[in-house]
Image (cartoon, helix red, strand yellow):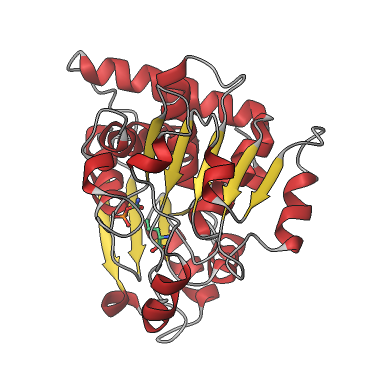
Amino acid sequence: MKCKDLISIAELTPSDIEEIFSVTRELKEWHSKGYDEKCLSGKTLGMIFEKSSMRTRVSFEVAMVQLGGHPIYLTQNDINLGKRETVKDGARVLSRYVDGIVIRTFSQEVIQELARYATVPVINALSDYLHPCQALSDLYTIQEKFGAYTNIKIVFIGDGNNVARSLAQISAKLGIPFHIASPKGYELTSDFTSQVKQMTDRSDILHLYQDPKEAAENANILYTDTWVSMGQEAEAQIRKQAFKGFQINSDLLKVAKDDVKVMHCLPAHRGEEITDEVIDGQHSIVYDQAENRLHLEKALLKLLLRR
Ligand code: CP
Ligand code: NVA
């Protein structure tokens, strides 16, 4: 993996992604045998979280500890990046103390600026625009469950949001067609879809629908996320209205493959984008998916911080 940071899947090559997956597989296997390579002994990770998190925060902290390193969790109250001091100064000073920075914030541009001025690796732990660690981990999970990607139909039902964008990018990088059904006004934008199309030679990489059932036909993977992302709370009522009908439920499963797998990045809003019956049912792989965040992030930390 040549890049210094992980800001967006757009910056990775297919072989970078394969390398991350291969290290993930190795680390996961060793961990299952009770062994964790202490390759980050003496290294420290700064973790800036300006939004809530359970999976990302805990998996990165545990990943660092399992690899022998030390995580420092920093909230908005601690460093107040961009307000108490500029992003540029924060990047330069943190780089004198820590060996890597994980950041979850609102603006993708802030993450880019932090990476530009930091001399240590910066990892995007979610912005309003992208969620690359989630998408890497999800495609790893798909490969684990199906053994390969060829002829896998991935269908996302819902908002053209950060999670959907990163999934579309990684699908394009790996040459897997990505299908997404969204209500009018909440689709992937045409600017974004043009960028994604340039990431691959395949002409059939993106399929946009307004009808969830049409999209879900013969799906191997049905994926969804919240209708109201962090920062959109004021729009909650309007969004919940717009997304009615874009739910993964047993009716939708009927049009997918018999052995369809259901994914959700979590946290789930049961009864909204997914029903209890489906998330708790035999098709759901959401908890294996969540577990893989840990193994995948260990691989990322090993590849980026050990240099
Ligand atoms: N999927 C995910 O990133 O979860 P958290 O928001 O809890 O970190
Ligand atoms: N789209 C969601 C993902 C949470 C992991 C959000 O941004 O809130």
Q: Is residue 125 above or below residue 217?
A: below
Q: In the picture provided, is 260 more to the left or to the right than 62? A: right
Please identify the quadrant where the N terminus is shown.
top right
- Where does ligand 1 appear, by image quarter? bottom left
Q: Is residue 7 visible?
A: no
Residue 133 point in image, percent of width and height: 45, 45
Viewer-side residue, 247 vs 296: 247
Residue 239 vs residue 232, the one in the foreground: 239
Location of residue 280 with respect to 128 vertically, above or below: above
Front in this rendered view, residue 302 or 259: 259
Q: Position of residue 181 (x, y in %)?
A: 57, 52
- Residue placed most toward the observer, 306 or 35: 35
Q: Please tell me which residue is depicted at 64% across the width and 26% down the height of the picture.
A: 15
Residue 25 visible in the current orientation: yes
Q: Residue at x 26, y 57 (%)?
A: 271
Q: Position of residue 102 (x, y in %)?
A: 41, 55
